[in-house]
Image (spheres, rainbow, N blue to C red):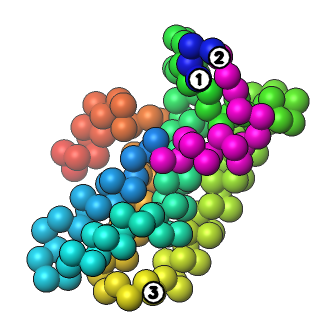
Amino acid sequence: MREENVIPVSVEEHLKVSARTSACHLLACTSLVGMDDIATKSSFEWVSTVPKIVQKLCIIVRLLDDIMTYEREHMTPHVASTLDSYMKQHHVTMKIACQKIQELKEESQKDFNAEWLECDGGQPRKLIEAIFNLTRTMEFMYNKDDNFTNCRNLEGTIRS
């Protein structure tokens, strides 16, 4: 996609591919490591199927990343973001696209919270809580800046 300057024609088409690139389905698995008898082999297999709560996590993080990194990533050739797809699909400015993607992120957060409250999947609540806490961590990392990339911004927070 990068070499061909392809921008998916819709946000939905873009998210079908790009949500997985957030790697949150892998982070969800790693968040279970060290949970001893709570995280069983079937727990890892369940997370590996990318259940709805993990799908929503991936979308939230992809949208957060695209909003916070858009300007920096446009300084060099890159893969199209959800903002690019939204602008192309709706013929709007970057500012409007950013607002709409923020709204989409908030809707995804509501869906995630509903999954958090209803999620069963036969998994212990503590295990689901680990995935919930991963979402909280990622929200913190992208709160006002791309602290995932610019981790020096967190130095004061970590020291306090």
Task: Name the side, left or right, on which 144 lies relative to 157.
Answer: right
Q: Position of residue 2 (x, y in %)?
A: 56, 19
Instruction: Report if residue 55 lies within the magenta region.
Output: no
Tag 1 secondary structure: loop
Looking at this view, is 22 or 109 the one in front? 22
Residue 153 in sight in this render: no
Nearest-to-viewer mark from 3 and 1: 1
Q: Position of residue 10 (x, y in %)?
A: 76, 40
Extent of the magenta region: 5-20
Residue at 63 percent across and 69 percent down: it is 110
Tag 3 secondary structure: loop
- Residue type (three-letter) at the residue carrying disc 1: Met
**Above or below, 22 relative to 52:** above
The local crowd at label 1, few if under 14, some if 14 to 19, many if 20 or more residues have their Cα within 10 Å, is few
Residue 5's mark? 2
Q: Which residue is mark 3?
A: 120
Residue at 49 percent across and 54 percent down: it is 58
Q: Which residue is mark 1?
A: 1
